[in-house]
Image (tube, grey):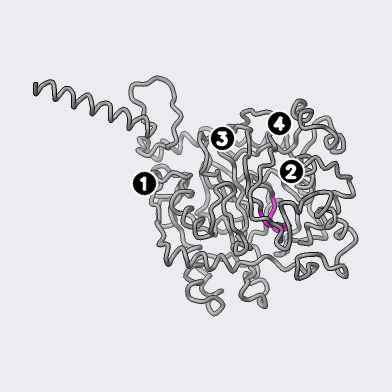
Amino acid sequence: MKKQKNQFFNLVRVCIILALGTATGVVFAQKGNVVSSYGPINQTQTFEQIKAERMAVKESRAKEHKELLNSRYDLSKKTSADVQMSGGKPIPVGPTARLSGVTWEQLSGMTPDQIKEKGVFPYKPLPFADHAEGGMLFPEMIIKSLPRLIRFDLDFDMPEHILPDPAPAIYLTTRPDLGDVAKGRLITISNYYEIFNGILNPKQLEGLRLLVTQFPQQQFNATEDRRTDRADGMLGVTCFDCHVNGHTNGASHLVGDMRPQEFRHKIETPSLRGVNIQQLFGSQRALKTIEDFTEFEQRAAYFDGDHCMAAKKGVNILERGSQVHFMAEFQAILDFPPASKLDIYGNLDNTKASKSELSGEQLFNGKARCAACHPGPYYTDNSMHNLKAERFYKQEMVNGMMMAHDGPIKTFPLRGIKDSPPYMHDGRCFTLEDIVEYFNLVQQLQLKAEEKKDLVAFMRSL
């Protein structure tokens, strides 16, 4: 009887172990690959082995991705001599997307099914530099100042002329009289106190300190599973490594929401300017407050949405009542850049705006239907919308990414939009001209060439 009981309990133990293995993605005596939500938490390879494997594919993956970008875009440097970002950098001009056997006018007259069948949609989802690998990837212009952000396995893929200012201007809602507080300086842990002491209150100053303090992250940490040679005191990233000076430098990542890997979306870093008027955060997560966003990023999103991996690599759990609150207090005073041609309602002042800008405003609020999602004065409806762009292209695997549905995406504010290229959640539109062409197709507006120019002129004035 005792023997039978032991056999029974052993059988129960085996069933429990198998059930747990299935739940956690662990495979027992099963052939083939199993798609799991979890990464290799219990790492069996050394850092040297991981690095060797990554370096073995670096050149081929980079070549493959560069060929894709060159096939989709004209990457040559084209900037405006007349219009600059608020920090002084010339804005990129386009459209940069390459067309295949059609003109923009012909494309505008085609139905979604016709465009899909011919395979000529120019703005398909944009893969990460190595989509199967993913992770935080920083532009060369920021790495020059912060070499701790170098990844040994990947180089940044976007040309610098389509990125924001390397040290963007900082405007504060509490001190508009100061204008640009940064004045060309990159705000880091070494200078934040000197620059902001006497301007911020103690809570805001402490919040800023935390925003420029390094914490471990999926690719930048002290474990063997990292993508940087450094494992010393210079490990980790700060919030302001991507949201540089409270804005953005175009650093890219993969969203943590989706699995498997090929369905994850590339995400281009959005600006933190104007978060005080926003009600949703994250491109798809729809987090409800900036505090939620700040806390979630630390707990899981920095680690690809994997709280198990976060526990291994050194997650920094921020205290909600003080640290998260202080960080949010500083973020909430980051203002949009001044827009001298807008009145107190966010509309163009007829005495200051050009004919093209005024025409663009009429189109924006009328025929182009931009204001349906981007109403003034901040040019966002604080909602999410599904543009259903998959109507225009076939679902297929391209460079490790499944060209599938985008789903609902947050409506980002358009105030100060000329400072924030590239555009869309994954940066697939390099210029404002590309944005107009994209929405002209997706909304089937059939805009004329002059109307497109006027829309761009209006958005540059915001």
Q: Quadrant of the N terminus?
A: top left
* Left or right position of 37 against 359: left
Mark 1 Cα within 10 Å, few/some/many (few <14, many 20+)?
A: few
Q: Regarding mark 4 in the picture, which secondary structure is present there?
A: loop
| Point 60% across, 61% down: residue | 275
Find out whether the residues at labels 1 and 3 contact each other: C-beta distance under 8 Å: no
Few, some or many residues within 10 Å of mark 4 (<14, 14–19, 20+): many
How many angstroms separate mark 4 from mark 1 (CA)?
40 Å
Question: What is the distance, in whole Å, between disc 1 and disc 3 at their CAs?
Answer: 25 Å
Residue annotated with mark 1: 312
Q: Give the amino acid at mark 4.
A: Tyr
Q: Which residue is mark 4?
A: 393
Counting residues from the start of the chain, the first of labels 2 and 3 encountered is: 2
Name the mark nearer the viewer: 1 or 3: 3
Give the Cα distance between marks 3 and 4.
Answer: 16 Å
- Which portion, as a residue range, is magenta? 412-423
